[in-house]
Image: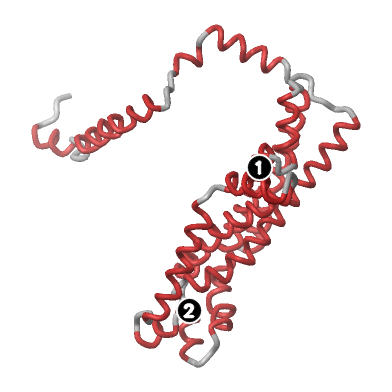
Amino acid sequence: MHLSPARAERARDPAALPRLLLTVLALLLLWPGLVLTEFHPATLVDPRNLDIFARFLAGFWPPERSAGFLVLLGRATLETLTMATAGLVLALLLALPLSLVSSHALSVSAVLRGQPSHLGRLLRYPARLLLIVLRSIPEIVWALLFVRAVGLGPTAGVLAIAITYSGMLGKVYAEIYESVDRLPAQALLQAGSSRLAAFCYGILPAAAQELTSYTLYRWECAIRASVIMGFVGAGGLGQMIDLSIRMFAGGEVVTILLTFLVLVLAADQLSNLLRRRLA
């Protein structure tokens, strides 16, 4: 069946050429990056590498189930959970005031005159700069520094999570305050209410679900980060994995990984439950 010239013109995708050019441009930009990383897909199917990988996986079975190891595993799991939770709580203590200062959702001058005052801007810029500094350095770097300062153990991990996550939470909280309907808060400010009362009764009810959802997501991320920081001496499951790998104890590694998987799944289910309760 042949289309008429008019119908063929209508059937032609006008965005096909731009998409093709963008795809070619993306490949040209990505190719130098692949060259710099020395990524060679052929190494994944090399017979020697496949043989080494198969023998490596064979050492992971069966999982370690001895009573003494399981006791140590339970203690490390509790340490990881405590590290993530304590670090997030400390992060919240710093993120909440910084988010209120850096957001112009509660600016009295913006409500009365339509734009924030110069003094308000001068106060917000340092708070936003501090949030940028806090979240710009990865928690693994902070963990390395605190291990040197306070020694091995979960204290370094708690402090590292608190610093990095306070910057992340503060930034996102400020954006959430500004994304919700601010008319109730503005009405309270115009009526002479304090900023704290305007926040608690005007902004917080509308933003509670989104704030809780993001906080729980960050708690899940903190659990994963706690395991990673264990490799630099912050304790928990990460330190156990590191020691087991060094001793070529594949069965122990599998048991720890399965425990970590169950831990993350439980955290995800708890997050879903709380989100449904707030919906």
Q: How is the image coloured?
A: secondary structure
Closer-to-camera residue (181/93): 93
On the image, the x and y values in percent for residue 68 come to: 90, 32
Q: Quadrant of the C terminus?
A: bottom right
Closer-to-camera residue (42/19): 42
Closer-to-camera residue (95/201): 95
Residue occupied by mark 2: 106
- Give the distance between the C-alpha atoms of the residues marked 2 and 1, in whole angstroms: 37 Å
The residue under the point 42% across, 69% down is 125
Q: Is residue 207 left or right of residue 253?
A: left
The residue under the point 66% across, 53% down is 271
Q: Residues within 10 Å of mark 2 (few under 14, many from 20)?
A: many
The residue under the point 22% across, 35% down is 16
Residue occupied by mark 1: 229
Per the rendering, the mark at residue 120 is: none
Q: Quadrant of residue 237?
A: top right
The residue under the point 69% across, 53% down is 158
Q: Quadrant of residue 48?
A: top right
Q: Residue lying farthest front?
A: 149
On the image, the x and y values in percent for residue 149 come to: 68, 50
Q: Earlier in the sequence, mark 2 or mark 1?
A: 2
Q: Residue lying farthest top?
A: 47
Task: Kindly identify the amino acid type of the residue bearing the numbered disc 1.
Answer: Met
Tell me: residue 240, above or below residue 53.
Answer: below
Task: Kindly identify the amino acid type of the residue bearing the numbered disc 2.
Answer: Leu
Secondary structure beneath label 1? helix
Q: Residues within 10 Å of mark 1 (few under 14, many from 20)?
A: many
Q: Residue lying farthest right?
A: 67
